[in-house]
Image (cartoon, grey):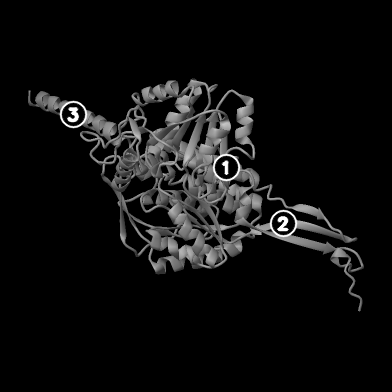
Amino acid sequence: MFNLKLCKIICSFGVQFKRIKLNYKMTDFGIKEALKKLGLKDINEGTSTGSNNFSNGEIIESCSPVDGKLIGKVIATSKEDYEKVMTTATKAYQSFRDIPAPQRGEIVRQFGNKLRVLKEPLGKLVSYEMGKSLQEGYGEVQEMIDICDFAVGLSRQLNGQTIPSERPGHVMREQWHPIGVVGIISAFNFPVAVWAWNTALAWICGDVCVWKGSEKTPLCTVACQNIIAEILKENNLPEGISCIINGDYKVGEMMTTDTRVPLVSATGSTRMGRIVGATVAQRFGKSLLELGGNNAIIITPTADLKVVVPGAVFGAVGTCGQRCTSTRRLIIHEAVYDKVRDAIVGAYQQIKIGNPLDETKHVGPLIDKDSVNTYLAAIESAKAEGGNVLVEGGVLEGKGYESGCYVKPAIIEAENHYKIVQHETFAPILYLMKYKGDVENAIEKQNGVAQGLSSAIMTNELKEAEKFLSYAGSDCGIANVNIGTSGAEIGGAFGGEKETGGGRESGSDAWKVYMRRQTNTINYSDELPLAQGIKFDL
């Protein structure tokens, strides 16, 4: 009898345990397991030269905007730590550049394969630490994989050119050499992909990298370093090829003022870009700047609503409006304005806001409460300038929204000249405005902002599309037809004009910024003729 009772108790406990375990899985979304797979601890060293991790700075606490909980801690980089990194990186460059480019490509290939294995845990970390939807987190890791694939092929195509010489018995040649130590400063909204865009290309070019990720997403930085460190160690490569530093803008200044860093690639706000660009220029270094966007979609009378609605809505609310390519403005022809407005407003009613790890939700939180305050201030500014609110914004409260970072995507009818419209707000606020007459009038509005990153036109009229893509059309680095502004595809050069900074990353010939160009003239004759027919007889 006693044994039977005991058996029942044990069985009951087992059932309860299973329920507890199931509940844990449902609420945790596998985050703890993901952290474990990525080699993350409660406290992590924020400075690394590969397998060698160290740090003596202040503690950075990474709290998730999803639920406000502490994910982990990272020790920031001190001045002494930075010097150790630079000494190691500079030494590593001397040997890494000796490795043939296709062999460097092999390292990148292995890195890409490792990312395939760890796509799920790294994607979850991106989603949890930054707040973007889980699918967007996976998508960001996929971008890393794609740029690795691109870089592997490119490692056999770092070609210069042969140029005819005006002098007989001479030939000119152009070739490309590694530039040295590449400094990378990335932003919180794409905490892993932007680093990969830069490093994958820099590595195949023969450069070594020092990366300062955002202090808002430090665990993503440490996780990526853990992944590449394994690859470098397996290939018996020296410390210093991949380095990370962590901290606030003061840590970034160590790189921007350092003459040992010939190229600084910086992604972030226009304000940050002005400081970085000026600082690096003062020492005659090179900078690759990827800054803010104020992106618009032009919607013409012939636009297909089946394309317009998903393109505009995802562009505006994806990543909670925290992409540099997020759609900020819809410029709609007056003939279809009411129809488009109603369709967009109707679509907003279907948006589900909540934990981004829950794949039934479309929109997660803003990165922090400072961003929430900026969002609220922007809405009030738009109202004050005369904007008409179509979809009310606001901060969500209650169960599931405890972090205080969840906001409602807002739609406001506005004019392009409003001060707040001219300013990029990193939040899900969409401005609607009309245009009359020909597409040129819409293009004028589209171009009438200080930023020049991404743009799009929705039309079935060939002439309108070609006008938009011409020299007289969009002044942005990215110009799309019948596709939204948001997102970038590996293969094309990513970047923009005007206050966006002018830099280009990822595809096309963006690799050239990570190298130095050299022109050679070779005399294979027995004479020494001078250029331009100059005579200098002795």
What residue is pinned by disc 2?
175
The residue closer to the viewer here, 326 or 87, is 326
Provide the secondary structure element on which disc 1 rests.
loop
Residue 374 visible, this orientation: yes
**Residue 35 relative to residue 115: left or right:** left
Reading the chain from its start, which is encountered first: label 2 or label 1? 2
Number of labels in the image equals 3
Where does the image place residue 448, in percent across and percent down from the top left? 51, 42
Provide the secondary structure element on which disc 2 rests.
strand
The residue closer to the viewer here, 435 or 42, is 435
Residue flagged by tag 2: what amino acid is it? Gln
What residue is pinned by disc 3?
16
Above or below, 261 against 449 in this view is: below
User: Rounded to the nearest whole Å, what is the CA distance between mark 2 and mark 1?
Assistant: 31 Å
Residue at 82 percent of width and 63 percent of height? 522
User: Rounded to the nearest whole Å, what is the CA distance between mark 3 and mark 2?
Assistant: 69 Å
The residue closer to the viewer here, 31 or 259, is 259
Residue 242 visible, this orientation: no
Q: Nearer the viewer, mark 1 or mark 3?
A: 1
Q: Nearer the viewer, mark 3 or mark 2?
A: 2
